[in-house]
Amino acid sequence: MPTVSETVELHQAPSGAVASPVGPAEASTRQVPDERSEPPGKGAPVRPYDFRRPQHLSADQLRSMQRIHIAAAELIQNRLGRETGIPIRVHLKSIEELAFALVMEAIPEHTYASILDLSPLEEKGLLLVESRLCLGLVDRVLGGVGKSPDEDRPLTAIDQVALEKPIEILLQCLRQTWQEVCPMKMTTAGRRNNRQQAQVLPPGEPVLCATLEAQGEVTAGWVRLCLPVAALKGALETASERSRPVRANAERLASFHSALRTALERVPLPLTVLVGSVELPMRSLLALRPGDIVRLDQPADKPVQIRVGGKPAFLGRMGLSGRRKAVQIISRTDPTEEE
């Protein structure tokens, strides 16, 4: 019996790059017949795999990563500005899954690279910092105004020593924001001064790449965190499993609160309006007769006190609603306040 086979051709990739499938539009409509499945034309379509931009993380996981790094950007902005005295704005520019080779192709030659120990994860991570931002921070640490140079250059040994504190601030902020989702050591295990020396992962390894953009009056640049997706995905799934009982307890508590509120809303409470008061001696009180007028202690146009369950709750204004006396609520008061 004849069989049908299909191959996916690959582009010839440049040196250091990752090959990617050709004809994605065509491949997405092709079908691979299987003798054990339905007849040709009724099988599931073949989905092309993008080797340069894989999609291993779910949309929910990517949104979680986005929230983490937005929080990290805010922390870095506050702490770096406070520690260095440089007014600087930091925001999350992008977050995506990329092949490691694609990340390394896109960075300039003299990018500062800090190899990260991600224990308990076995793989290494990478913190990349643009050279001009590094040199601006170095200038500030050494007593300057923190101005980035006009031309890119490699970092000297002195530059790398001066940069240790700012880099540690970056890592502290990233560790703190990752703590609740996936606690990692995230400390420097090695430093590299150019991209050729920072090949800590295989070229085709999928990585989560979060890019933060820093912008100040005299310095600017980007910070890029690269984490291995394979190890990260397992840790995120474990964290999700741990959080399920917490979410279930929260849902039960919310349901209880809702039921309690519904029950409390049915409880009747007396509402009284205190128009005014007056103190009288006993003989005047005993002498009162129908038709006598008693003057109260407040003017007729002054707001009256409205009590709920005997406690002051509102202030109101007296009036009429049709042929019935009424009071209009004009403000709220402290229910615990006594006269």
Image (spheres, rainbow, N blue to C red):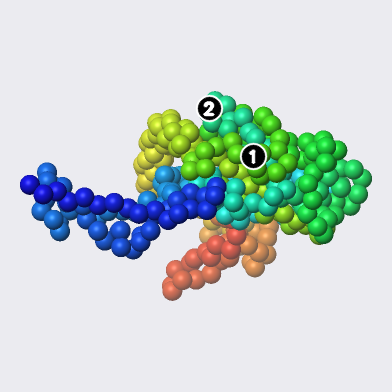
Q: Quadrant of residue 195?
A: top right
Q: Residue at the spot x=48%, y=33% of the render?
A: 231
Q: Residues within 10 Å of mark 1 (few under 14, many from 20)?
A: many
Q: Where does residue 9 sit, x and y in percent of width and height?
A: 35, 54
Helix, strand or loop for disc 2: loop
Q: Is residue 215 visible?
A: yes
Q: Residue furthest bottom?
A: 322
Q: Residue at the spot x=50%, y=47% of the render?
A: 99
Q: How much space separates mark 1 and mark 2, taking CA atoms?
A: 17 Å
Q: Where does residue 284 sit, x and y in percent of width and height?
A: 65, 51
Q: Quadrant of residue 12?
A: bottom left
Q: Residue at the spot x=83%, y=41% of the render?
A: 156
Q: Residue furthest top?
A: 120
Q: Which residue is mark 1?
A: 198
Q: Is residue 252 left or right of residue 44?
A: right
Q: Which residue is mark 2?
A: 122
Q: Is residue 44 visible?
A: no
Instruction: Give the number of marks.
Output: 2
- Camera-nearest label, 1 or 2: 1
Q: Where does residue 329 sit, x and y in percent of width and height?
A: 55, 62
- Is 289 in front, or is 338? 338
Q: Residues within 10 Å of mark 2 (few under 14, many from 20)?
A: few
Q: Amino acid at mark 2?
A: Glu
Q: Residue furthest left?
A: 1
Q: Amino acid at mark 1?
A: Ala
Q: Quadrant of residue 125?
A: top right
Helix, strand or loop for disc 1: helix
Q: Where does residue 110 sit, x and y in percent of width and height?
A: 73, 48
Q: Is residue 97 left or right of residue 163?
A: left
